[in-house]
């Protein structure tokens, strides 16, 4: 996730290069076993259909797809001895970071795209990084919903996201109670970027507490302490729209592939040896 991206950017330093790849129709790459097709039927317009590939909504699909997508880049990383702490996979998005000289990341990009093409994996065509889609090697682009510019050393959120985040927080601030799913939607977004704002660690406790419910229709009381933290976050999110420095990390992983483990979502995490 974002902590791994920030750690990689800090390790590679100013002018870090990165790219993002995305699958076309990600789940369609994996066929379902013939003896499992009975679970793949659905009805539409009074007709029955069977889906022969993985489907959204199936609890098994995420794990099966993740193993496949992770295998594709693990093969390349192993061949090139590319540091796994510089590779971040989230669902069908693959973000790869490399030093500013470009030698390592160019070799990875060339081999990975070629390997996918030869293996029958359909990747999105690279576009301009400003379109927030798959793009080639660059200094400035969006990774996991956050924009980074490694030459200026800054990160920011797109203006439409800033507007939505602020509006959602303001709605909670003006309410006495809200539904749990409304808290998940608005507070969850704020907590997602909190790792990029070091000072925010003093203003997340009540947000985390409010976000911990499990019943989406449960009523959450907007307490005084929760309001105080929301009041801190509203101007901070507005400031994020203008851009903030990429925060330093003090536990950057060494760039050796055998010193990094990968979590269940395919992201890199530090290994302790």
Image: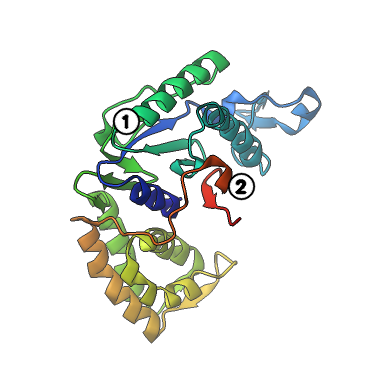
Going by the picture, which residue comes out furthest to the top?
118
Q: Earlier in the sequence, mark 2 or mark 1?
A: 1
Q: Compared to 215, does 78 lie above or below?
A: above
Q: Compared to 271, does 220 lie above or below?
A: below
Which residue is labeled 2 in the image? 264
- Look at the numbered disc 2 and give the secondary structure of its residue: loop
Going by the picture, which residue comes out furthest to the right?
35
Query: How far, Cα to Cα, is label 2 from label 1?
Result: 29 Å
In-image side of 263 versus 108 (left or right)? right
Q: Where is residue 70 shown, x and y percent of the image?
A: 57, 35
Q: Nearer the viewer, residue 117 or 101?
A: 101
In-image side of 265 versus 11 (left or right)? right
Residue at 61 percent across and 34 percent down: it is: 65
Q: Quadrant of residue 199?
A: bottom left
In-image side of 233 versus 151 (left or right)? right
Regarding residue 226, the answer to whether it shows in the image is yes
The quadrant of the rendering that contains the C terminus is bottom right
Q: Where is residue 93 shown, x and y percent of the image?
A: 46, 37
Residue at 39 percent across and 34 percent down: it is: 20
Q: Compared to 194, does 221 lie above or below?
A: below
Mark 2 or 1: the one toward you: 1
Going by the picture, which residue comes out furthest to the bottom?
224
Q: Residues within 10 Å of mark 2 (few under 14, many from 20)?
A: few
Which residue is labeled 1 in the image? 102
């Amino acid at each position: 996730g974002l902590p791994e991206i920030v750690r990689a950017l800090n390790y590679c330093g100013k002018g870090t290069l990165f790219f993002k790849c995305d699958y076309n129709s990600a789940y369609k790459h994996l066929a379902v076993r013939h003896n499992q097709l009975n679970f793949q039927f659905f009805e539409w317009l009074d007709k029955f259909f069977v889906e022969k590939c993985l489907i959204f909504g199936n609890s098994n699909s995420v794990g099966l797809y993740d193993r496949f997508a992770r295998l594709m880049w693990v093969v390349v990383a192993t061949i090139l001895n590319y540091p796994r702490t510089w590779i971040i996979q989230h669902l069908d998005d693959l973000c790869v970071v490399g030093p500013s000289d470009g030698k390592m990341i160019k070799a990875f990009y060339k081999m990975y795209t070629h390997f996918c093409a030869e293996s029958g994996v359909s990747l999105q065509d690279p576009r301009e990084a400003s379109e927030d889609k798959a793009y080639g090697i660059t200094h400035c682009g969006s990774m996991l919903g956050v924009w980074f510019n490694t030459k200026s050393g800054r990160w920011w959120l797109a203006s439409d996201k800033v507007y939505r985040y602020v509006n959602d927080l303001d709605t909670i601030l003006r309410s006495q109670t809200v539904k749990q799913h409304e808290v998940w939607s608005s507070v969850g977004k704020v907590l997602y970027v909190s790792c990029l704002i070091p000072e925010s660690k003093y203003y997340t406790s009540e947000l985390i507490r409010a976000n911990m419910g499990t019943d989406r229709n449960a009523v959450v009381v907007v307490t005084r302490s929760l309001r105080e933290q929301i009041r801190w976050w509203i101007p901070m999110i507005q400031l994020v729209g203008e851009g903030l420095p990429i925060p330093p990390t003090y536990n950057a992983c060494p760039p050796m592939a055998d010193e990094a483990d990968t979590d269940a979502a395919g992201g890199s995490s530090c290994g302790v040896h």
